[in-house]
Each structure stands twice: as structure tokens, then as C-alpha cells.
Amino acid sequence: GAVVSQHPSWVICKSGTSVKIECRSLDFQATTMFWYRQFPKQSLMLMATSNEGSKATYEQGVEKDKFLINHASLTLSTLTVTSAHPEDSSFYICSARDSGRTDTQYFGPGTRLTVL
Amino acid sequence: KNQVEQSPQSLIILEGKNCTLQCNYTVSPFSNLRWYKQDTGRGPVSLTIMTFSENTKSNGRYTATLDADTKQSSLHITASQLSDSASYICVVRGNQGGKLIFGQGTELSVKP
């Protein structure tokens, strides 16, 4: 089946530093990728929709200058958390939509970010 | 407002027993409904996906039902195993290519 990978699977960083998370579709092309954030005991919250070759669309309340998204190829999207603070500690999950099958959406395994 | 409500919020059952999780939605228009299993610290994994015209779909010990008239869905787990302990999330897509709308999930714990 379709596979979406994320790297790293977990990261610990100091407050004020920036962290980059990669999301790759391994066996399909993804024109559209999605970034979600999940706090403990809560469901996934969509942060932004990433479209290959164009600017990402951010959900209301998500700071685009803090969460930089780049979708430079059909198999890779990156999320950079800039100047991270402890409140940014969360589980970040990406999802990729198969370009050839627009109603399919596969989730990555997630990245646990802890900001000290 | 488009919403997806799940019940119960949490559930504890003994290994080998069956259970049924519920999902009610108010999303309109409706494209499809999915059930995902999410293990702790992992991303969601798809169990079933059903469109408007489908009433039931099975995936091994998982059977999902859909009543598009009453906007209700259920996920039945048969002969539960310890590895079934996870969060089960009901997700609805409102229209073709639209955003996914997530329920809060049901936390299932299977005890020996």
C-alpha cells in the first residue's frame, strides 16, 4: 500500500531554535500534502494545506511566518517550526493525497517535537 | 457547522469480546466516511472508507456500517485482541477533494 514517511520521528530542541520536519510520499506523487498537529488526548487539527509549486494555505489561527511550509517536489513537503517555544511541543503529522486518486489521503507516522 | 461526534469517548473491554463504536455527523454535502486506527505515538491508519451508496464494509475483524439517511456510522470489532487497543477516529469528507473533518476519537483499551 501507499506509504508516507516522516523524518525525524522525534526531536528535542532548545527554545528559540528552528526545527525542520520532512514528509515524503514513497510510492506515489502527491500534488497536495497536509500538515496536522495533535495535542495529547485530542484529535488531529489541520494546520495547513501544501500544494506543490505554490504557497501553502494556512488554517485560521496558524501563523504562516512561524510554521514555514515548502512543497518543492511531488514527493516532498517540509514543515519548519521557526523560533520554537515550549508551547509548540506537539505531535506533528503529515498526510499526502495521491495525485492519481484524488480521494485518497495517506498519513505519515508523525513527528514528536519537544521544545525545552 | 460541520461536525463529527463519536461515542463513547473511551471504552474498556476484555480480550476476545466484541465492541461497537459510534459516529454521528452533520457534514453536508457528504462524500465519504472513513474509520482510522491510531496507535499511541503513531499516525492514523485507514481501516475502511465508505461512500454514500455503501452500507457496510469489512476489513478483517473490523466491520463499518453507514446510514447516510440518519448520518450515522458504526465500527464493530469482533473477537478483540490486545493489539486493538488504540484510538479509533471517524473522519468525514464533505465533498470531493475537500478537507477531512475529524471526530474526537474513541479510546479503546483491551484488557487480558
Image (tube, rainbow, N blue to C red):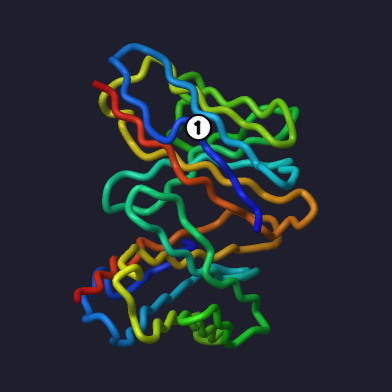
Horizontal and vertical percent for residue A6?
A: 52, 37
Residue at the spot 20% in from the left edge and 74% down from the top edge: B111
Find the residue positioned furthest to the right.
A100
Is A46 placed left or right of B98 in the picture? left
Secondary element at tag 1 = strand
Provide the chain ID for the residue under circle 1: A
Front residue of this view, candidates B9 and A8: A8
Horizontal and vertical percent for residue A9?
A: 42, 35
Quadrant position of the C terminus of chain B in the picture: bottom left
Q: Is residue A90 visible?
A: yes
Above or below: residue B107 compared with residue A89: below
Amino acid type, label 1: His
Residue at the spot 32% in from the left edge and 19% down from the top edge: A13
Above or below: residue A18 compared with residue A87: above
Residue at the spot 30% in from the left edge and 67% down from the top edge: B85
Residue at the spot 61% in from the left edge and 49% down from the top edge: A3
Mark 1 lies on residue: A7
Horizontal and vertical percent for residue A22?
A: 55, 30
Is A64 placed left or right of A28 in the picture? left
Is B28 placed left or right of B1 in the picture? right
Horizontal and vertical percent for residue B95?
A: 66, 63
Above or below: residue B32 compared with residue A67: below
Callout 1 crowding tier (Cα within 10 Å): few <14, some 14–19, many ≥20? some
Q: Is residue B73 visible?
A: no
Front residue of this view, candidates B68 and B106: B106
The part of the image, by quadrant, that contains residue A78 is top right
The part of the image, by quadrant, that contains residue A52 is top right
